[in-house]
């Protein structure tokens, strides 16, 4: 059985995404999935469309590491993006 993840209540703000380039995927409320690229650009995994991060920020539902660990969630479109679990820095290997 999967263990429930705790919401920390701490907001995840935009500048925290700077260090997460190529390390997270972002799912929006309209079920689109993006990979965060450098300089705060996001790339849609299905159609390769590239957008600026701020264009989708308020539509973000879930932020996950490439390995699938949830870093932040938003309950609905009107709530804040909140960190999930313990605050730890994400480590990744650059390609």
Image (cartoon, rainbow, N blue to C red):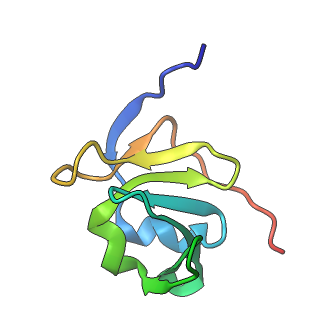
- Residue visible at 59% across and 71% down? 45
| Residue located farthest toward the left when viewing the structure as drawn | 78
Query: Is 60 displayed left or right of 87 in the figure?
Result: left
Q: Position of residue 79 (x, y in %)?
A: 19, 49
Relative to residue 11, is residue 86 depicted above or below? above
Side of 50 where 14 appears, left or right: left
Image spot of residue 20 (x, y percent): 59, 67
Residue shown at 70% from the left, 48% from the top: 67
- Counting the numbered discs, the total is 0
Q: At 55% from the left edge and 51% from the top edge, which residue is drawn?
A: 64
Q: Residue at x 52, y 74 (%)?
A: 18
Q: Viewed as shown, does residue 57 lie left or right of 51? A: left
Frontmost residue, 87 versus 83: 83
The vertical placement of 53 against 70, above or below, is below
Name of the residue lying farthest toward the top = 1
Q: Quadrant of residue 24?
A: bottom right
Q: Is residue 69 left or right of residue 71?
A: right
Residue at the farthest front position: 47
Q: Quadrant of the N terminus?
A: top right
Quadrant the C terminus occupies: bottom right
Image: 75 above or below 31: above
């Amino acid at each position: 059985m999967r263990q429930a993840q705790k919401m920390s209540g701490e907001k995840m703000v935009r500048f925290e995404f700077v260090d997460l380039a190529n390390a997270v995927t972002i799912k929006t409320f309209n079920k689109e999935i993006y990979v965060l690229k450098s300089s705060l650009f996001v790339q849609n995994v299905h159609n390769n469309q590239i957008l600026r991060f701020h264009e989708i920020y308020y539509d973000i539902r879930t932020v996950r590491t490439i390995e699938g660990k949830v870093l932040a969630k938003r309950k609905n479109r009107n709530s804040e993006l909140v960190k999930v679990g313990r605050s730890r820095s994400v480590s990744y290997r650059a390609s």
